[in-house]
Amino acid sequence: MLKGANIYKDFTPLKARDVADAIYYMVSAPAHVNILDIVMTSSQQGSATLVDRSGRKY
């Protein structure tokens, strides 16, 4: 693990299955549904100045 990456060891990141589920929904949605954009982030998303630590397993 990279130095400093320990802070993320108990976070739940997005997984390939999460993205695949979103893609499946897009291609199988009814014809009247128009999807313009999808923004996916983990519920424990980090930024340069803030990390949401809710949901951590202590």
Image (cartoon, rainbow, N blue to C red):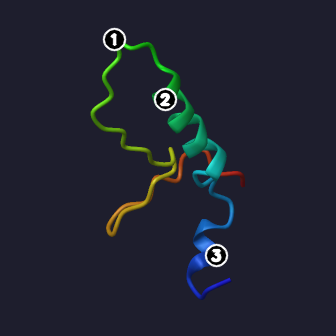
- The image's mark for residue 32 is 1
Label count reads 3
Up-down: is 6 above or below 15? below
Q: Earlier in the sequence, mark 2 or mark 3?
A: 3
- Residue at 56% x, 82% y: name it: 4
Q: Is residue 58 left or right of residue 42?
A: right
Q: Give the residue number, with chain letter if any, for mark 3.
A: 6
Q: Position of residue 51 (x, y in %)?
A: 44, 59
Name the spot of residue 32 as percent of width and height, x first. Answer: 34, 11
Residue farthest to the right, as pictured: 58
Q: Quick check: 49 above or below 31?
A: below
Q: Is residue 34 left or right of residue 51?
A: left
Circles 3 and 1: CB atoms closer than 8 Å: no
Mark 3 burial class by Cα count in 10 Å: few <14, some 14-19, many 20+:
few
- Residue type at mark 2: give it: Val
Q: Amino acid at mark 3?
A: Asn
Q: Earlier in the sequence, mark 2 or mark 1?
A: 2
Observer-side mark, 3 or 1, equals: 1
For residue 27, which numbered disc appears in the image? Answer: 2
Question: Which quadrant of the figure contains the C terminus?
Answer: bottom right
Tag 1's secondary structure? Answer: loop
| Rendered residue at 36%/63% (across/down) | 47
Residue 5 spot, x, y in % from top left: 59, 77
Residue 41, horizontal then vertical, whole percent: 45, 48
Q: Quadrant of the N terminus?
A: bottom right
Tell me which label, 3 or 1, sits earlier in the chain.
3
Kind of residue at badge 1: His
The CA distance from mark 3 to mark 1 is: 45 Å
Q: Secondary structure at mark 2?
A: helix
Q: Residues within 10 Å of mark 2 (few under 14, many from 20)?
A: few
Q: Is residue 44 left or right of residue 17?
A: left
The residue shown at (46%, 29%) is 26
